[in-house]
Image (cartoon, rainbow, N blue to C red):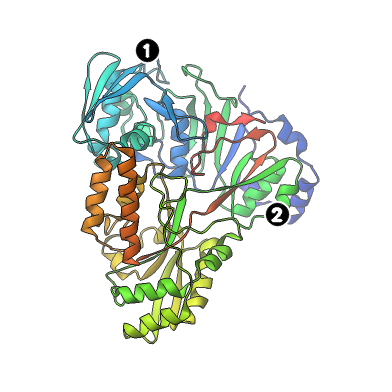
Amino acid sequence: MTYHSPLTRRSLLSASAATAALLLAGANATFAQGRTNLMVRVSKGAEALDPISRTGQVDGNVIRSVFQKLISFKPNIYEWELDAAESIEQVAPTEIRFKLKPAQMFTDGFGEMTAEDVKFSFERYSRPDAEGKISAYKDDWASLIEVKVDDKYSGRLILSEPSPALWNVALAGGSGCIVSRKAVEERGVKYRQQPVGSGPYRVASFEPGQRVVLEENPDYSRRHPVFKECVAQLIANAKTAELALRSGEIDFTELPIGADPELAKLPDVRVSTMPAQRFVWLGMNVEHAPLNDIRVRHALRYGVDVNQIVEAGYEGLAKRLNAMLPASVGGYWADAPSYERDVGKAKSLLAEAGQSRLALKVTILNEPAFQNMALVAQAQLQEIGVELKIDQRESATYWSAGKGDGGKALELFMLRFNAHIDPNFNTRFFQTEQIGQWNWQRWSSPEFDALHKASSMNMDPEVRMAQIRQMQMIMDDSAAFIWLTNEAISYGYSKRVSPAIMPNGNDWNFHYFERA
């Protein structure tokens, strides 16, 4: 019999200080010890479990445990190994040959995986889905012309150009998931909530935006998960999640900066912090006057103390970042300049630009770290004669702020992107073609664009990384980016589990969680 934890929205939201005191005293210790499944808290509910329709981190984490890929990353490191493929080889700059392992079965009675399923899975990124929409992840397969099927288990990926990023971004990433063609065609839009994979878990139940219950797939061909059931439960409020962790109702959660320090002292709870691979920066819309004057942008860069800003946002847990890529990502620019605050120089630059008193607005996500950083920047810029208004937004309105024609009204903003292990995945968002999408700076550099294309095709790793560093130098010359931090991520988890977290801190491999 499968055991489901009695974790409900009502029980969590009714938690009080008195309840917390009881939980601290160990009132629910028996409950925690008796549960055999894995309970994971997510701060945003899963929305779509079809790989081409995934909406972000939570969807991706579920999908990673439900589907196989030709290759997949090993636990906790960015090094790939064979998954559904028996063999795979780059036989030419624009051709990759693969052979599937036989007898890999899709769940729900949809039969054996074949090369036709691989062809369908990869080529569908360039075609409209059941609702006529093209996948947001189409660029992951931008270089794919077609998948040629040679026999039941073998085929070849034919590319339009060399694409070294294809291995880490597409093949080993979420866009490399192999779906059942028959199931997708039969279920249509319903496939987003009723996915069919061949991975270590299958979806037992799914309440979009709330809860996903995964159970072991007995037909999986590789290592089976230690926990036979995994539940990803939405708990939006961080304090409520802390209470649930104390009580043993959940086993694992990301913790906000500034979480209750008493958590780490509890005998049944472990707290750990790791550097993230996100990059956070204070950006400037270079089309918006007076930010279209590079002297003003330089003045703002000299007018802030990045160390103080990061300290205020992350309480000493995160390190300063001086360029786009953190040290753990290929193409890291170790010698990037570290701009220190110089009030006199900032004032002089503003005067040179004819800006003695300047009023600007910074748009931020309504999170404590961003609020604290914005307040410090506001105080610092006031000293150089810049009045900074803080525009705090909830997630829905914030993430659309820089898109379309509405993005022209942005002035300053604090933005966070999740860095990918492949550097070109990160640089692509700052191309000219991304203006109105993710290039909120509305910054255009033909030299940057050309280097992005060249590095995307360069099969020489050393030369390619040099090109990535050169791109960051061009970004630095623009003075449109004040790099802040790659953040730090804290987790709280039960002493009975050992989490499996990739180095970026965002990707959790539920099927690799162990008993401690």
Q: Give the structural element (helix, strand or loop) at label 2.
A: helix
- The quarter of the picture where the N terminus appears is top right
Q: Are marks 1 and 2 in contact (CB under 8 Å)?
A: no
- Of residue 44 and residue 360, the one placed in the foreground of this image is 360
Q: Determine the residue positioned at 45% across, 82% down.
A: 344
Residue 232 visible to an observer of this rendering: yes
Q: Residues within 10 Å of mark 1 (few under 14, many from 20)?
A: some
> Of 273 and 299, which appears nearest the observer?
299
Label 2: few (<14), some or many (≥20) within 10 Å? few
Give the residue at mark 1.
Answer: 102
The amino acid type, in three-letter code, at marker 1 is: Pro
Residue 473 located left or right of residue 416:
left
Q: Who comes first in sequence, dot 1 or dot 2? A: 1
Which residue occupies 32% across, 68% down?
Answer: 285
Q: Is residue 389 left or right of residue 245?
A: left
On the image, numbered disc 2 is attached to which residue?
Answer: 261
In which quadrant of the rendered image does the C terminus lie?
top right
Q: Amino acid at mark 2?
A: Pro
Residue 239: where, in percent of width, then height?
64, 54
- Res. 136 image quadrant: top left
Snapshot quadrant of residue 445: bottom left
User: Residue 228: image x %, image y %?
Assistant: 58, 25
Q: Nearer the viewer, residue 107 or 261?
A: 261
Label 1 to label 2: alpha-carbon separation: 51 Å
Percent across and percent down for residue 72 are: 42, 29
Left or right relative to 460: residue 198: right
Q: Is residue 80 above or below residue 40?
A: above
**Disc sitting over residue 10 in the figure:** none
Residue 440 lies, in percent from the top left, at 33, 61
Q: Nearer the viewer, residue 374 or 46?
A: 374
